[in-house]
Image (spheres, rainbow, N blue to C red):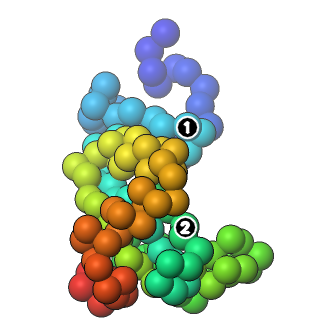
Amino acid sequence: MPYSARRSRRSPFALALHRVLGDCVALWGSQNRFSWMMGYVYIVTNRKYGVLYTGFTTELKNRVEGHKTTKYKGSFSSKYNTHRLVYFESFERITEAREREKQIKGGSRMKKIQLIEALNPEWKDLYLTL
């Protein structure tokens, strides 16, 4: 069955983009996220050796602003005040960032601290460098 004849819950933008790019577009999960988008893995904390939150995103600056302003009330970030960006990596594809996030989350707390200190030994807020 041709793509245009299938019923879909995808947005009109995603449908149009799929028609243009064809098989280059890969849908990820139930959301319309495209594998060709650049991705970031990041770790935020409330203080040196404090609570660590690991995440991934396509827009690092906006995501860290969300942590800083406690955009989502009741979230882990707002509850533990994780607002200081202490580590991040960038990837050409969001799928690579997601895999790296899983790898980091699967590691021990000590491995995360070693990762941070290799890049940022003083645990400075890297948000200002974005």
Classify mark 1: residues with Cα within 10 Å, few (<14), some (14-19) or many (20+): few
**What secondary structure is found at the residue carrying circle 1?**
loop
Residue at point 26% right, 59% down?
90
Given contact means CB atoms under 8 Å apart, are the residues at marks 2 and 1 in contact? no
Side of 18 where 106 appears, left or right: right
Mark 1: amino acid? Gly
Judging by the rendered image, the residue that carries numbered circle 1 is 29
Describe residue 55's horizontal placement relative to residue 34 as left or right: right
Instruction: Name the residue tied to disc 2.
Output: 53
Q: CA distance from mark 2 to mark 1?
A: 22 Å
Whether 108 is drawn above or below 88: the answer is above
Q: For the view shown, which residue lies furthest in the right direction?
A: 74
Say few, some or many: other residues with alpha carbon within 10 Å of mark 2 (under 14 / 14 to 19 / 20 or more): some
Residue 100 image position (x, y, % from top left): 38, 46
Quarter of the picture containing the C terminus is: bottom left
Q: Position of residue 44 (x, y in %)?
A: 48, 74
Q: What is the x, y in percent for residue 48?
A: 47, 84
Q: Residue at x 46, y 60 (%)?
A: 110
Whole-percent x, y for residue 91 in the image: 25, 52
Q: Quadrant of residue 128?
A: bottom left
Residue that appears at 54% across and 70% down? 52
Count numbered badges in the picture: 2
Q: Quadrant of residue 73?
A: bottom right
Looking at the image, can residue 32 be seen? no
- Give the number of the disc on residue 112: none
